[in-house]
Amino acid sequence: MIYALIFICADWVFAAAFNENMLRNRIEELERQGYLGKTVSLYEDLLQYHPTDPELAHGLARALKAKEDYVELVRHLKKWVKSNSKDELAVLMLGEAYLDLGEINKAIQAWNALISSQHASLGTYRKLSNRCESAGFFREAISFLEKGRKANGSKKLFVWELAKLRMRVGFF
């Protein structure tokens, strides 16, 4: 009787591992073929097995973005960031999702929360500025670079980037 129970449990574990490998292989195959949007349900299934895996959370976010399901993307990333506030990539993606929905103020809020919640590197300020610049929000791009200068105590930082952006908006 005990042997049968052990056999059944081992069978369940093997089946779960096999199913997980099949899901991962299917995701890889679809992504390689350029069908990222079709991987949403597969990523959701894998997140059931590993709800704290950042690679899966990021993968689901990429798939939702490819599918252009920005409402679900924001919902997913807000939930993820709530329990993983130091996940810089997820916060960057959340801001971009808000931009895709046309909600610039929410994007800026998400990104400001990132730099105020932890010691942000110079690269983080540059990434945020670049994202704002790409979306045509030059004043916000300038603001992030100026915050980076202030946080790092040096007016010599981001000189060229600020000059370029200021020329674009007309302040000198």
Image: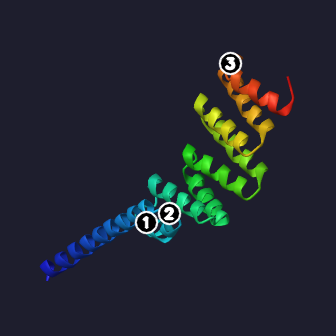
> Is residue 121 at all visible to an observer of this figure?
no
Mark 1: which secondary structure?
helix
Residue annotated with mark 3: 153
Mark 3: which secondary structure?
loop
Residue annotated with mark 1: 30
Mark 1, residues whose alpha carbon is within 10 Å: few (<14), some, or many (≥20)?
A: some
Instruction: Say what amino acid the circle numbered 1 marks.
Output: Leu
Residue annotated with mark 2: 36
Display colour scheme: rainbow
Instruction: Say what amino acid the circle numbered 3 marks.
Output: Gly
Q: Vertical placement of 74 versus 88: above or below?
A: below
N-terminal-most mark, 2 or 1: 1
Q: Vertical placement of 102 versus 40: above or below?
A: above
Q: Which residue lies furthest to the front in this view?
A: 33
Quarter occupied by residue 2: bottom left
Give the residue at x 76% y 24%: 163
- Is the Cβ of the residue at disc 2 closer than 8 Å to that at disc 1? yes
Give the residue at x 32% y 71%: 19
N-terminal-most mark, 2 or 3: 2
> In this rendering, which labeled residue sits more in front, label 2 or label 3?
2
Label 1 to label 3, Cα distance in Å? 47 Å
